[in-house]
Amino acid sequence: MAKNTLSSRFRKLDIDEFDENKFVDDHDEAVDNQGPDGTEIENLIRIGDTMTAFHLALRNPPLNTKNPAVKERALAIVLRVLTSFKSSDIEPAVKSLDRSGVDLLMKYIYRGFEKPSDNSSAILLQWHEKAFAVGGLGSIVRVLTARKTV
Amino acid sequence: MSLHQFLLEPITCHAWNRDRTQIAISPNNHEVHIYQKSGNQWVKSHELKEHNGHITGIDWAPKSDRIVTCGADRNAYVWSLKDGVWKPTLVILRINRAATFVKWSPLENKFAVGSGARLISVCYFESDNDWWVSKHIKKPIRSTVLSLDWHPNNVLLAAGSCDFKCRVFSAYIKEVEEKPGPTVWGSKMPFGEVLFESGPSGVSGGAGDGAGGGWVHGVCFSHSGNRLAWTSHDSTVAIAEGGKTSTISSLSSETLPLLCVSFITENSLVAAGHDCYPVLFVYDGTKGSVTFGGKLDVPKQTSQRGISARERFQNLDRRATSSETTEQGLESLHKNSIRWGCICVFLGS
């Protein structure tokens, strides 16, 4: 056998990088949101004002950044707010959102599904049911096709 | 509205003739079958066998009565009826991937073919050599072209593509036509010029967080050519007006993605897709808004009979709901995705 079949270093080469027709996403990082403010939201949850905390948490989503730490931080804050809701309060909270807010909420819900913890799945499923009732299949399709993820 | 079942295979594409008495369909294989209407029935009259791959697009030119077909074998054929037989003429498209869509221009002297080779082939007949010649529009298309529509002025061409954008190109061929006058989309129209491009930078109405994140499945110009609508895989339908292209109105719908769209008047459009029923949308130009107008496939209400307690528990067990819908499948007329809509508006006389 030839000598070059012994080496398997070529298997670590990513040849798609050398493809001159490769689709490069035009992803602008210029104007970026740093995600919600953790301390303020903690205070609101402590005093029981979950509705305001909810709206605050959904503002400034870090959609454009490539930095995973910013996204993780934002996700943790939003999940903290979602899990601190009582079941009966979920529906009015979802109804208070506009169309793009519902889409954003769905994105966070699916991100929350990715790493289930002890009691997060149950409450997230309730959030999912209420958000689906408002957003429909279209909002889930938009989670799947979104170029800018949360 | 009438229902006719042609065969068991899916129909991948179809085209009507001028007076809707004949229809050419492709039953998901290499052939085109032409059916003729006789009374209440549709009778198969011709079979067009020339392609070596699945047929992906058919268009029937109403005035000149020619059919153009394009397929996954990277070819297109123009068929003309001679002595009761359809004779094909090969068109060299010069593409190295499958063709996806084909459309005759309004004056029927050109046709455009979209392809997976990331380009559009605009073909016209060169009478000196007695064959069809193609010209390519390549830049800035970065992925497969999914759908095309011509502007009424025979020059502008809208293309929806898998690179998440809908664009308007100029397909001006100086060998077959005069220089076009200015339109709302622009006045300088050399071949291949991009007069409009949708995308995250262009969308401002509707979805707030910079959407435009889906393959553009269907595009359509309005009758005047001043408005352009497209449907995208992120379940949105959007409309842009030439001249005011900085504001695009879009509607994020709650349905599954729509695959084809067509204007019926300047303000209303019909679209259909993975949810198997056609849907009406209404556009308000002054407010710049698109609203849902209703489903166009309302199933007949089956008589409501009482439901016993046993059936209720059975439903709860099987389907986690105790409602009394006995219809297991979809309630719409179409049982699978509608891929290709062809809206014809009959003008009574």
Image (cartoon, grey):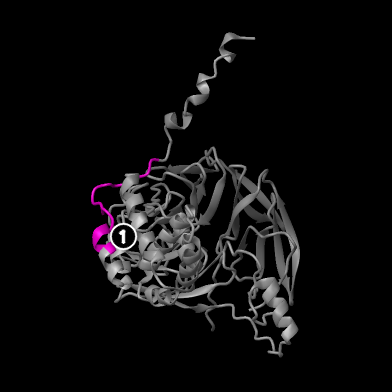
Find out whether residue A145 is within the magenta segment.
no
**In percent of the image, x 67 and y 82: which residue is there?**
B324
**Amino acid type, callout 1:** Trp
Q: Is residue B105 above or below residue B237?
A: above
Where is residue B344? Give x, y as percent: 55, 72
Q: Is residue B161 left or right of residue B16?
A: left
Q: Is residue A124 visible?
A: yes
Secondary structure, mark 1, is: loop
The quadrant of the image that shows the C terminus of chain B is bottom right
Q: Is residue A27 visible?
A: no
**In percent of the image, x 51 and y 57: which residue is there?**
B104
According to the picture, the residue beneath numbered tag 1 turns out to be: B185
Find out whether residue A40 is within the magenta segment.
yes
**In percent of the image, x 60 and y 71: which residue is there?**
B19
Magenta part of the protein: which range?
A: A24-42
Q: Is residue A98 left or right of residue B90?
A: left
The one of B130 and A127 positioned closer to us in this rendering: A127
Where is residue B147? Give x, y as percent: 49, 55
Where is residue B288? Give x, y as percent: 31, 72
Q: Quadrant of residue A109?
A: bottom left
**In percent of the image, x 69 and y 46: which residue is there?**
B50
Disc 1 packing (10 Å; few <14; some 14–19; many ≥20):
many
Chain where mark 1 sits: B
Where is residue A5? Give x, y as percent: 59, 14
Q: Is residue A78 above or below residue B298?
A: above
Q: Main secondary structure of the magenta part?
A: loop
